[in-house]
Image (cartoon, coloured by chain):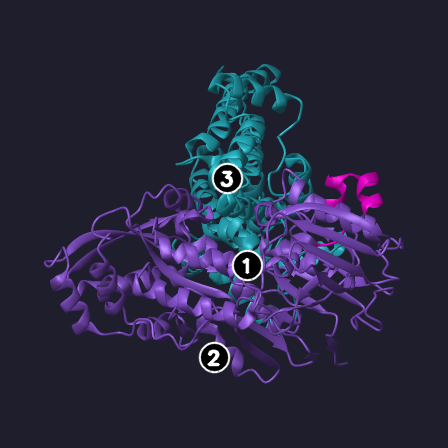
Chain colours: A purple, B cyan
Amino acid sequence: MIVSKVMDPTTYDPVIPIDNPAIWDILLMFDQLVRMNREGTGTEPGLAESVDVSDDGLVYTFHLRRGVKFHDGTPMTAEDVKFSIDRLYQHPRSFFSDMFQIIKGTRIIDPYTFEVTLKKKYVPFLSTMALFSASIVPKKYMEAKGEEYFGTHPVGTGPFKFVEWRRGDEIVLERFKDHWRKGMPYLDAVRLKIIPESNTRILNIMNKDIHVANFIPYNMIAQLKANPDIDMQINPLTKIDFLLFNHLKEPYNDLKIRQAMNYAVDRKAIIKSVLFGYGEVANTFLPNMLGLDRSIKGYTYDLEKAKQLMKESSRPNGFKTTLLNIAGSAEYTQRAVILKEQLAKIGIDVNIEMVEEGTWWDRISQLDYEISDAYMTTDIVDPDELLFFACVYGGGSKAYFTSWRNEEFDKLARATQTETDHEKRMKMYSRLQQMQVDDAQLLLLYRSPSRCAVLKTVHNFKVLPTGNYRLEEVWLEE
Amino acid sequence: MRRYVLRRLLHFLPVLLGLTVFVFLIIHLIPGDPARIMLGIRATPENIERLRHALGLDRSLIVQYVTFLANLLKGNLGTSIAYRTGVLEVILQRLPATLMLICLGAVISIAFAVPLGVLSALRPRGLRDNMIRLGTLFGFTMPSFWVALLLMMFLGVRWGIFPVSGFGKTFGERLWHLVLPSFVLGLYLTPVILRPLRASILESLQANFVTTARAKGLKEWEVTFRHAFRNALIPSVTIFGVNIGWLLGGTVVIEATFSLPGIGMLLVGSIFKRDYPMVQGVTFVFGFLIITINFVTDVLYSYLDPRIRMGE
């Protein structure tokens, strides 16, 4: 099967990359102790058959599956698991190491039992263990060959085995015959072809040169839907778009201004013209994932209310402001223009400042902006990562660099990390989402889906909410 | 001739040095802190400090430049942040696609431009001349990604003659995959060579030595090719040389459209990944190629026109 990729991956050493092209391939070649279920609502067993959690929630004991082999034929044991997990939180280049600093220590009990002790109780722990970075690598192989070599010649336990990587052209994987999920995968080989141009991807799939073309532009969906050979899949994705308010800059320290702007934006109109209708109004800060409370009303378009709030605000006559806009994407450019028009109706004169994404990041992380484009996607099943990144002041990113601070909110957010009762924890999340809406921390916009064109001869293919895909159950019709 | 080449070589060196200064400065011209930008979402102060140190950004500018130059002389272009391997290693893996594309593009443009240029010049302002000039102008003015998409759509998808995109494994496969991309590139270059060639053939045909040749009773094709054409080639070579260098930039769009694993694509990808050592490396290689091509053109020029080296 031939699947298109948008960019060349960077490295296949699981703890290093941050780019999706590398992450998604890692997930095809490696396994983790637990993994996200197909629906994206929780975890399911991976290399660990079962997990015991101590009563105080501090000790996690993983019972490893027996008879699992790495692609080089060596058996997977607790020694490899300890090596992999230790790298994850101790390696100097481990990109997500901050998410695992909660680990106090790891221990091998016997070749098939592995134990992790946490510094303090942390309910989302299992969910973070499903992260691609927590992939299990063979200790002996990596030590013998070196990390740099491993990055281009990876060996895992996953359904597909690495064969060849022709930089900028394609990556070839083949079926791992000794994979522990008996009888899987079905495909003999997978070729991951790098095709950066969306038009070229579309022409390739129309020509049946490839089986899967991802990242279809919104304006091409209708045409591909009409093609009898193509199944145009629109699936939920854990992506959410919003604007940031810099709460340190006037007048964004004024709640009425933030609320007025939230009421003044007609999100449905934006979704209709920019996303061709393929999107959902964001009522809270969470993307389409565990913890999202759809019953919260959020802000619906109400121009009168917005005008009224402006009158009562610190700037009754309106003001001028600058929107920091990420350049290079038609979606962001079109959106900015519509927002400018919509906000002008309540007397806000928006100047659009386009910057390259690196500069954008530099500017917002220094809080050098007034309002700015922003988005997020989750890497794990649990909403904890996003909650602390986007809304908690002490979460390391000053609440997505808005500098929003709400003591009560932060306290409740911390409480979710130790609440073991799932129902109660989800209720806490609902409360948090409502509080965030009430305080209008962000100018919420929309949630957008994944858009993937798949030939109809391909069966069981589906893009997961995290954007990647699993191929072990996929098969091709002759 | 040898003295002339030596002298050109001496000009070549300061330009090369200038290039190294420019490439070195790339990382310092980025607004903001390159280390923070590279690390993105998880840039903690410790991580930033570590990366700054690894890139040598915490040293003085002069020290950094001298280190950069010393490494360059050893053939070391640094280590890629994203790929975690040597910059030069990755560039060398991806250079063949770009070089093959440029060479084939150049061959195609010459194959079009030379006969068409001669045909145009033989009957200036006639219907044939106008058609040729107008037709090739189309190739020049159409955006290359658009022409590429049209070719892919018709010759690739609809009639299935050529592959839509990609590069292939064997040399033969690669040539086959490069037909459409190099055609697009060649189409662009054709009028650039054709117009000066036509003009200079016209000029040559009116020169005294051509009248003499005709008076000697030579056949018209002999007059055209032996006498007029050879003299007319000189300006075309210069223009060709200048544009070949410039074409390197044009390959970025063509590589992206046809998914060719060349260094143009590598440059774009590295900019997105904020892999600055790689951006520096590719820019240097591009610059080096352009300077080298210009040097070769100059030498070739002097070979074709002895007056240039006589005038030293």
* Mark 1, other Cα within 10 Å: few <14 / some 14–19 / many ≥20: some
Give the main secondary structure, helix, strand or loop, of the magenta stretch: helix
**Callout 2 secondary element:** helix
Q: Position of residue A204 (x, y in %)?
A: 61, 69
Chain identity of mark 3? B
**Callout 1 secondary element:** loop
Residue B34 against residue A221 in the figure, above or below: above
Which quarter of the image is occupied by the C terminus of chain A? bottom right
Nearer-N-terminus badge (1/2)? 2
Residue A239 against residue B306 in the figure, above or below: below
Residue denoted by label 2: A222
Q: Is residue A320 left or right of residue B280?
A: left
The magenta stretch spans residue A270: no
Residue denoted by label 1: A418
Q: Position of residue B221 (x, y in %)?
A: 57, 47
Asked whether disc 1 touches disc 3, contact meaning CB atoms under 8 Å apart, the reply is no
Q: Is residue B117 visible?
A: no
Q: Position of residue A152 (x, y in %)?
A: 73, 46
Nearer the camera: disc 1 or disc 2: 1
Q: Position of residue A216 (x, y in %)?
A: 52, 69
- Inter-mark Cα distance, 3 to 2: 44 Å
Residue denoted by label 3: B44
- The magenta segment is A135-153
